[in-house]
């Protein structure tokens, strides 16, 4: 029962909050804005109000490392967004706006960083970057 309850507590990532269609992602890259903070890059579009104010996706290019490293980086990005998304959702809803954001890991992981506790060490580094990117997006939404 607790597992079912955890999905609806606001802290999980629901299906509606993920960017899933190729068209939405293509639109972000073709017509969206771009900003960077630390190891994270964000491509985003601002839209009108909808039921889910914030939808996002994550990516890590091949320059980051092999498949295992890229997947770890994407996991870290997803976790950072999960922790920071509630405030952004509230601000976007108050502005009657929505945002689609593609977060991209934009820094190579050095071989020395690939040892144990990789995720525990990098999550505190990426959290301020994701928070800053979400703030930039909400500020842009307020000004458009």
Image (spheres, rainbow, N blue to C red):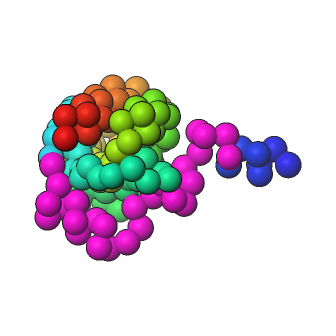
In this rendering, would 130 be left or right of 90? left
Q: What residue is rendered at 40% in x and 26% in y? A: 124
Q: What residue is rendered at 41% in x and 67% in y? A: 20
The one of 60 and 48 positioned closer to us in this rendering: 48
Residue 43: x percent and y percent? 21, 51
In this rendering, would 28 be left or right of 120? left
The one of 31 and 123 positioned closer to us in this rendering: 31
Q: Is 47 placed above or below 113 here?
A: below
Residue 25: x percent and y percent? 28, 65
In this rendering, would 143 be left or right of 13? left
In this rendering, would 49 be left or right of 45? right
The quarter of the image holding the C terminus is: top left
The one of 22 and 52 positioned closer to us in this rendering: 52
Magenta stretch contains residue 44? no
> Can residue 141 be seen?
yes
Task: Identify the magenta region.
Answer: 8-33
Q: Is 140 placed above or below 70 here?
A: above
Q: What residue is rendered at 43% in x and 47% in y? A: 53
> Can residue 125 be seen?
no
């Amino acid at each position: 029962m607790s597992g079912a309850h955890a999905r609806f507590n606001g802290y999980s990532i629901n299906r509606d909050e993920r960017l899933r269609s190729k068209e939405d992602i293509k639109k972000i890259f073709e017509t969206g804005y771009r900003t960077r903070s630390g190891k994270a890059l964000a491509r985003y579009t601002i839209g009108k109000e909808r039921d889910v104010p914030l939808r996002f996706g994550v990516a890590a290019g091949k320059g980051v490392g092999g498949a295992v490293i890229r997947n770890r980086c994407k996991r870290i990005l997803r976790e950072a967004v999960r922790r920071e998304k509630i405030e952004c959702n509230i601000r976007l809803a108050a502005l009657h706006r929505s945002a689609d954001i593609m977060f991209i890991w934009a820094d190579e992981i050095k071989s020395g960083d690939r040892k144990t506790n990789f995720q525990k060490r990098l999550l505190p580094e990426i959290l301020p970057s994701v928070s800053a990117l979400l703030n930039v997006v909400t500020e842009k939404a307020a000004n458009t």
